[in-house]
Amino acid sequence: MGSMRIGVPREIKDGERRVGLPPDGARALADVGHDVLVERSAGLAVGFDDAQYAGAGATLVDHAPDIWRCELIVKVKELQPPEYALLTPGTTIFGYAQLTRDPELVDVVLRAGVRIIAYELVRDASGALPLLAPMSRIAGRLAPFVGAQSLYTDRGGSGVLLTGIDRVAGANVLVIGAGTAGAEAARIASRLGCRVTVLSRGGNRLNALAIELAQLGTPIAASTIEKMGPDGFAEAIAGADLVIGAVLDPGKLSPRLITRVHLRSMRTGSAIVDIGIDQGGIAETSRMTTLSNPTYVDERIVHYAVPNMPSLVARTATEALTAATLPYVHRLARVGVSRALADDPGLAQGMLVAGGAIVHSDLAMALR
């Protein structure tokens, strides 16, 4: 395989400051003969200025259409409406796709004839999700902090201080999900002095998390949702100052576990941080918000439902994400997209659409 033209556009989603490749990544690709085109100011918000990209051997591009004509587009967030008209048939887009919740976007990419490999569905040899995991960890670590802000009275919150003070106990925090994001949220909340309960649909990761935190001196209450039963689940929600939703079914919509009836049992001004909003969210009342307007109140409960929460710490998030994605970019560029997919079944699991057709079974089922 010869050299490949690789495009890095500037992200335009509300509040998004991450960038698909850092200058060091661009240099590594340029040094082996690939043409790396970077849209001007693409990395400026995280401290990567245009001069750094130019010094790394990348070509700076003023006009976005030039980027989108590259063979491989490396980006972060899903396609935005102003980008639809820029799509070029045969181009491969490598980034978070989030097609499951957006039938309109599916129609756009099918008509455009592009290939999309979704970060959130790529698996490694062990079956883990290596390109989703770093952002899930960051979102989980951020969740208690944005939850703390959601409890502020100026956001419509109840005025509970998450950490407590003196003889006033910390907040009751309910984490639903014990996977990557949920475990990180529980770790941070327990260290902040909260009274933490973690509920999960499965027991293995939940038990390991409970043992870990007990050994660290920050114990949590833990149970499976099935063992707790509907009444116990409702009681846990009713007693929570902050609920963190962290349930993930890769490639599928989130289960709507929290109903309006549940919310009506909570104290006015309690809060929900819905980490899984990209997959539709965990609550009946969940609807996507933006970093510029992150919360709303429904059923007297403050909802925080930002899909790109890691952009709050965009420098760290870019470095963590690109450390995971860059080896895949190298492989795609070195041997070509078709060969890379054929050689790596885990990478192939990320392929959603190609040649005007849906090629991922879970996406096809979700859109029925």
Image (cartoon, grey):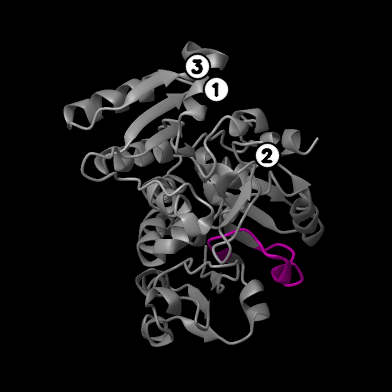
Q: Where is residue 5 in the image (x, y as percent from the top left)?
A: 56, 72
Indicate the position of residue 160 as horizontal and vertical percent values.
40, 46
Q: Are marks 3 and 1 in contact (CB under 8 Å)?
A: yes
- Tell me which segment is drawn in magenta: 73-91
| Residue at image coords 53%, 13% | 229
Residue underneath mark 3? 232
Q: Quick one: label 1 or label 2, which is nearer the N terminus?
A: 1
Q: How far apart are marks 1 and 2 (CA)?
A: 36 Å
Is residue 183 magenta-colored? no
Would you say residue 350 is visible in this rendering? no
For residue 342, side relative to residue 65 (left or right)? left
Residue flagged by tag 1: what amino acid is it? Ala
Distance between mark 3 and mark 2 Cα atoms: 37 Å
Residue at the (46%, 29%) spot, across then down? 239
Q: In terms of sequence position, does the residue under pointer 3 or pointer 2 come before the other? A: 3
How many other residues sit within 10 Å of disc 3, few (<14), some (14-19) or many (≥20)? Answer: few
Q: Name the residue under label 2.
A: 360
Q: Is 80 inside the magenta-drawn segment?
A: yes
Residue at (43% x, 34% y) in the render = 175
Q: Which amino acid does label 2 sit on?
A: His
Lateral position of residue 190 relative to residue 206, left or right: left
Compute the Cα span from label 3 to label 1.
5 Å
Which type of secondary structure does the marked residue at label 2 adopt?
loop
